[in-house]
Amino acid sequence: MPKGLKSSSSPIQVSASFIETGANTFSQLRVDLQLNPLDNEVFVVQAIDINCSSPDLNANLASSTSGSVSTTARTTVGSIGDSNVLGVALLNIRNDGVSAVSFSQMSPETPTASNLDYIGIIATNDFFIQVEGFNNLIAKAAQVRVYGYRATADASVYAALVQSEVLSS
């Protein structure tokens, strides 16, 4: 349990799924956690699982589908180098017209983070899922499951968490 927090729920799984608004178009979904800010309630994220649609295999074109989960709204799919991003998935097909090879990158790579109590804390009322395809013929989807629990924080910890989250966008 992170310092300054007291668990207020059993483990919770929050799932969401959505599709790009059009092929190769950055799209974002807001997921409401229904936290109670009057009680300084936060969501402690223990693990994330992100699945994206497979990219299309196109002659002579590399293609990809990428997705991310962030604590604040974004204008691009994030990377693990961004402070407001909790997890990322990237599926690629490299194609030179003669042969094609697929690659996948995910972070975190498993739904349970080993040796970590948590991977992030969401202090505002929601989190965001992003998806974007590249060189695909049809719109791609992202499915996400976030594992965690609700907790309450004392006033100073809550204020610091909210400020840190808002400033990370």
Image (cartoon, rainbow, N blue to C red):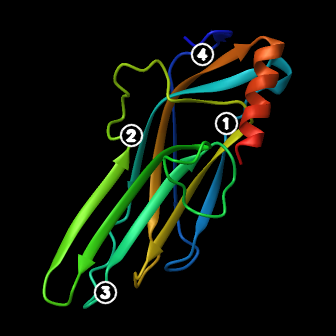
Mark 4 and mark 1 lie on one chain; the one further toward the N terminus is: 4
Query: Picture coordinates of residue 143 (x, y %)?
Result: 45, 53
Residue to which mark 3 is pinned: 61
Q: Quick one: label 4, few (<14), some, or many (20+) residues within 10 Å?
A: few
- Amino acid type, label 2: Pro
- Amino acid type, label 3: Leu
Tell me the CA gap for discs 3 and 1. 39 Å
Numbered mark located on residue 9 in the image = 4
Relative side of 45 to 103, left or right? right
Tell me the CA gap for discs 3 and 2. 28 Å
Relative side of 14 to 62, left or right? right
Mark 1 and mark 2 lie on one chain; the one further toward the N terminus is: 1
- Amino acid type, label 1: Leu
Point out the frontmost of discs 3 and 4: 3
- Amino acid type, label 4: Ser
Indicate the secondary structure of the residue bearing disc 1: loop
Residue to which mark 1 is pinned: 33
Point out the frontmost of discs 3 and 1: 3
In the image, what residue occupies the spot 58% across and 70% down?
26
Query: Picture coordinates of residue 146 (x, y %)?
Result: 50, 37
Residue to which mark 2 is pinned: 108
Tell me the CA gap for discs 3 and 4. 48 Å
Indicate the secondary structure of the residue bearing disc 3: loop
Looking at this view, name the residue that lies furthest to the left. Answer: 98
Mark 3 and mark 1 lie on one chain; the one further toward the N terminus is: 1
Query: Picture coordinates of residue 142 (x, y %)?
Result: 46, 58
